[in-house]
Amino acid sequence: MASVSTATVVPAFARASRATPAAANSGDARAPSDFTLTVNGRDHRLAVDSRTSLLDLLREHLALTGTKKGCDHGQCGACTVLLDGRRVVSCLTLAVAAQGRAVTTIEGLAKNGELHPMQQAFIDHDAFQCGYCTPGQIMSAIACVNEGHAETDADIREYMSGNLCRCAAYPNIVAAVRQARPAMKTASRD
């Protein structure tokens, strides 16, 4: 039986391998891709390698260094940004995949010199120690509230669990989210 299935599968792989070189010659993935990206309400015309992560594009091409590179594997949340209002880890998101969508980074939160309610709450509750994870924590906390996952402390802890803080400021982060939630709900009604 094993030899029958091998004989059946081999021709399919052989046909696929003959088709692959033609597809590979159609374009070099390293060649810059031209696209427009909307970041913090501003359009940016870019030409970057199509394999560039959103994190690297923000930091290296747009000089928006508030988004931090932590693990570069999507496990720590330090690079969290909002993509059409939803949180994503930008280290695992291709920049070209964000075309036509609104990207919001920590630099895009304050309006007219006034901090976003979540930024102010993090300051009020000293919800950071070294501050490295803070931008990702704030972006994730905003999404947590907007998603409706901040009704209880247990919910906040659960839905913020993808953002790690090596300094263990977690109780203060929960308090900050709790404080910012009503202000954010009021602002969204205006």
Image (cartoon, helix red, strand yellow):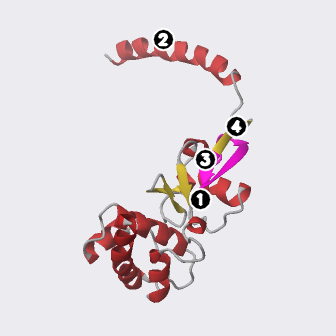
**Disc 4 marks which residue?**
33
Q: Name the residue at 32% across, 73% down.
A: 157
Q: Label 4 to label 3, Cα distance in Å?
A: 10 Å
Q: Is residue 168 above or below residue 59?
A: below
Q: Secondary structure at mark 4?
A: strand
The tag earlier along the polypeptide, 3 or 2, is 2
The answer to whether residue 149 is left or right of residue 18 is left
Range of magenta residues: 37-53
**Disc 2 marks which residue?**
11
Q: Label 3 to label 2, Cα distance in Å?
A: 37 Å
Q: Determine if residue 1 is in view.
A: yes
**The label number, if any, that marks residue 95 in the structure image:** 3
Q: Name the residue at 61% across, 64% down.
A: 69
User: Looking at the picture, which amino acid does disc 3 mark?
Assistant: Ala
Q: Secondary structure at mark 3?
A: helix
In this rendering, which labeled residue sits more in front, label 4 or label 2? 4
Q: Label 1 to label 2, Cα distance in Å?
A: 51 Å
Q: Position of residue 3 (x, y in %)?
A: 38, 15
Q: Position of residue 8 (x, y in %)?
A: 40, 12
